[in-house]
Image (spheres, helix red, strand yellow):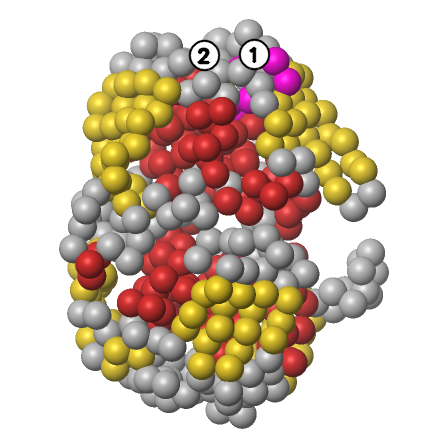
């Protein structure tokens, strides 16, 4: 555990670049591993989650060379083995607490003709997996999972999972839960299935997998809310992938600059995927002064839109955030709660129940922490839905807060502390390494 204490900052000024987008990095690794040819991935984010996917692919027989530079851009090279080139690992595969690694690899391993056991860390072992195992079983994968007889939902499944894949068939699957991880697992399994696999979304989620597969010349099509992919066709490496900066990591700096008077911040080359920028849309509605300049990269690097974000401090006001907006900002909800706590008026976040099943229960962690700092926050349950209502205060007060072992809670509370009156103590910041090891150093360079 690494505790931290800090005083409020007077303002935030400067220009920064950020490590590559974690969501894109997972997909770049996995798809490069099963493609024909060698792929260089530049601006690879050397966080614990991304490295977990990398090391797991190595255990599956994929050759990967890496140049990981602390506080600088990192590059890795993947020697693709083709669709049928993965090897049975010597033992179980441990995925730590990386939910994206676990769920996407479930899809990939469902297409292999060997059995493998996937194990998880403490927090990931508490996260639901039936949303993944059910459609993969429908495709023909044999999956056994852990059940908890004393839980509220006795049918729910949890890690560890054992998967025996191969001989898959295409299915049409309508998503009951908005989840890019579930969608991606089905699509990856669809690469190995007979015929066509179709995924129907009622609420659109981030489309990094679809974009990446198109870059690798997969036979994949998107028509409104349906994704279609044909199996048994080899993927071809584009040679080089440049990953833009992580918008979820940028979120903490964006909110900090927006709520600290006298601040101006420029963040270079950030991912601007339309299904990931809900944070920017919400903050602009709250009155934040944010300017976005899109970059015109070469086609091989422009599989994902990217650009610069310029933030100037401004007075925020409370707004309503609707249920259908949540998938585009699910990871940014904790830091948006901090923004709402110091905005004038009331902010309502509707339909935020998925926060209960993240690395920690983020509804609980943010409620307790912000309440202890003087925020006016309450949770309203209506049937199966949960809303958070926050009435802005003139300022938060410093105090003792907890990370709850969750990286996004920890970074959100660092931002809250820098905007509060008095000193703030956070019990553990080591969990930040999960997604953004260099967060505190980047932050220090901007504080005045």
Say if 317 sits above or below 54 in the image.
above
The boundaries of the magenta stretch are 338-346
Which residue occupies 19% across, 46% down? 296
Which residue occupies 41% across, 46% down? 274
Check if residue 99 falls in the magenta segment: no
Q: Position of residue 125 (x, y in %)?
A: 62, 60
Q: Position of residue 429 (x, y in %)?
A: 45, 36
Q: Nearer the viewer, residue 321 or 14?
A: 321
Q: Nearer the viewer, residue 378 or 64?
A: 378
Does the image show residue 124?
no
The crowding category of the residue bearing disc 1, from other C-alpha atoms within 10 Å (few below 14, some 14 to 19, many at least 20), is: some
Q: Position of residue 178 (x, y in %)?
A: 60, 55
Q: Which residue is mark 1?
A: 344
Q: Nearer the viewer, residue 383 or 116?
A: 383
Give left or right: position of 46 versus 180.
Answer: left
**Among numbered discs 2 and 1, the one appearing first in the sequence:** 2
Would you say the residues marked 2 and 1 are in contact, meaning their CB atoms lie under 8 Å apart?
yes
Say if 45 sits above or below 166 in the image.
above
Provide the secondary structure element on which disc 2 rests.
loop
Q: How many marks?
A: 2
Check if residue 343 falls in the magenta segment: yes
Q: Nearer the viewer, residue 392 or 327?
A: 327
Does the image show residue 10?
yes
Provide the secondary structure element on which disc 1 rests.
loop
Q: Which mark is residue 270?
A: none
Which residue occupies 75% across, 42% down? 385
Residue 447, located in which quarter of the rendered image?
top left
Q: Position of residue 118 (x, y in %)?
A: 54, 73
Q: Which residue is mark 2?
A: 315
Q: What whole-number distance in Å separates the C-alpha atoms at marks 2 and 1? A: 8 Å
């Amino acid at each position: 555990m690494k505790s931290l204490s800090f005083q409020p900052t007077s303002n935030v000024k400067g220009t920064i670049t950020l490590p590559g987008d974690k969501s894109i990095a997972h997909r770049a690794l996995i798809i490069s591993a099963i493609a024909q040819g060698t792929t260089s991935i530049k601006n690879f984010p050397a966080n614990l989650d991304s490295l977990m996917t990398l090391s797991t692919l190595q255990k599956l027989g994929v050759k990967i060379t890496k140049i990981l530079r602390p506080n600088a851009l990192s590059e890795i090279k993947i020697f693709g083995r083709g669709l049928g080139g993965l090897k049975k690992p010597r033992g179980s595969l441990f995925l730590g607490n990386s939910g994206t690694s676990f769920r996407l690899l479930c899809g990939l391993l469902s297409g292999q003709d060997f059995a493998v056991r996937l194990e998880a860390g403490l927090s990931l072992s508490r996260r639901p997996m039936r949303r993944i195992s059910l459609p993969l079983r429908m495709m023909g994968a044999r999956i056994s999972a852990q059940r908890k007889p004393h839980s509220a939902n006795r049918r729910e499944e949890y890690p560890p999972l054992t998967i025996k894949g191969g001989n898959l068939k295409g299915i049409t699957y309508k998503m009951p839960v908005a989840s890019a991880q579930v969608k991606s697992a089905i699509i990856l399994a669809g690469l190995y299935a007979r015929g066509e696999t179709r995924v129907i979304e009622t609420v659109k989620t981030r489309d990094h997998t679809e974009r990446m597969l198109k870059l690798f010349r997969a036979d994949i099509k998107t028509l409104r809310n349906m994704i279609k992919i044909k199996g048994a066709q080899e993927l071809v490496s584009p040679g080089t992938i440049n990953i833009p900066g992580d918008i979820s990591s940028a979120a903490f700096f964006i909110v900090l600059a927006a709520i600290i008077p006298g601040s101006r911040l420029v963040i270079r080359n950030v991912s601007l995927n339309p299904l990931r920028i809900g944070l920017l849309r919400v903050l602009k509605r709250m009155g934040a002064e944010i300017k976005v300049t899109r970059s015109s990269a070469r086609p091989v690097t422009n599989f994902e839109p990217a650009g610069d974000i310029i933030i100037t401090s401004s007075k925020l006001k409370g707004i309503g955030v609707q249920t259908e907006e949540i998938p585009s900002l699910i990871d940014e909800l904790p830091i948006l709660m901090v923004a709402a706590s110091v905005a004038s008026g009331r902010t309502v976040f509707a339909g935020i129940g998925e926060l209960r099943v993240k690395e920690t229960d983020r509804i609980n962690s943010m409620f307790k922490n912000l309440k202890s700092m003087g925020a006016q926050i309450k949770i309203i349950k209506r049937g199966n839905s949960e809303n958070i209502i926050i009435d802005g205060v003139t300022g938060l007060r410093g105090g003792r807060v907890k990370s709850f072992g969750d990286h996004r809670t920890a970074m959100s509370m660092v931002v809250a502390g820098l905007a509060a009156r008095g000193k703030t103590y956070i019990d553990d910041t080591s969990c930040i390494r999960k997604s953004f090891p260099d967060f505190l150093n980047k932050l220090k360079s901007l504080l005045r």
